[in-house]
Image (cartoon, rainbow, N blue to C red):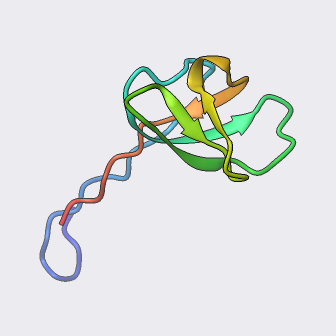
Amino acid sequence: MTNRSGHEEEPMPTYRWSHDKPTRPGWYWFRGLAHEADPFIVLVDQAGEFQWPDGGFQEVSLANGEWAGPIEEPKE
């Protein structure tokens, strides 16, 4: 598909919720199992940890929820 400026457009990636925890660093969507809060985006680091919105850190392996991603970086 070509946009108005004549550049080829790539389709947007489709993300699906999964109980599979991230195994590599990157940006991911996260939501709790009870859907008690809106989903949010977290950065999983090289050590396998991410930061909650309140500032606390947690290991991905201990987080109970669903994940989607990794989120791809936009192309220039």
Q: Nearer the viewer, residue 58 or 24?
A: 58
Residue 11 picture location, percent across and down: 32, 52
Q: Nearer the viewer, residue 59 or 65?
A: 59
Name which quarter of the figure residue 56 lies in. top right
Lateral position of residue 60 relative to residue 25, left or right: right
Q: In the figure, 61 relative to 38: above or below?
A: above
Lateral position of residue 56 relative to residue 50, left or right: right
Q: Residue at x 13, y 71 (%)?
A: 7
Q: Residue at x 47, y 25 (%)?
A: 48
Q: In the figure, 31 relative to 12: above or below?
A: above
Residue 46 picture location, percent across and down: 37, 30
Q: In the figure, 20 relative to 25: above or below?
A: above
The answer, for residue 17, to whether it is visible in the render is: no
Q: Residue at x 43, y 26 (%)?
A: 47
Q: Residue at x 25, y 55 (%)?
A: 10
Q: In the figure, 11 relative to 7: above or below?
A: above
Residue 50 picture location, percent across and down: 55, 37
Quarter of the image with the C terminus is: bottom left
Q: Return the residue found at the far bottom.
A: 5
Name which quarter of the figure residue 31 lies in. top right
Q: Nearer the viewer, residue 52 or 30?
A: 52
The answer, for residue 14, to whether it is visible in the render is: yes
Residue 33 picture location, percent across and down: 79, 28
Name which quarter of the figure residue 30 lies in. top right
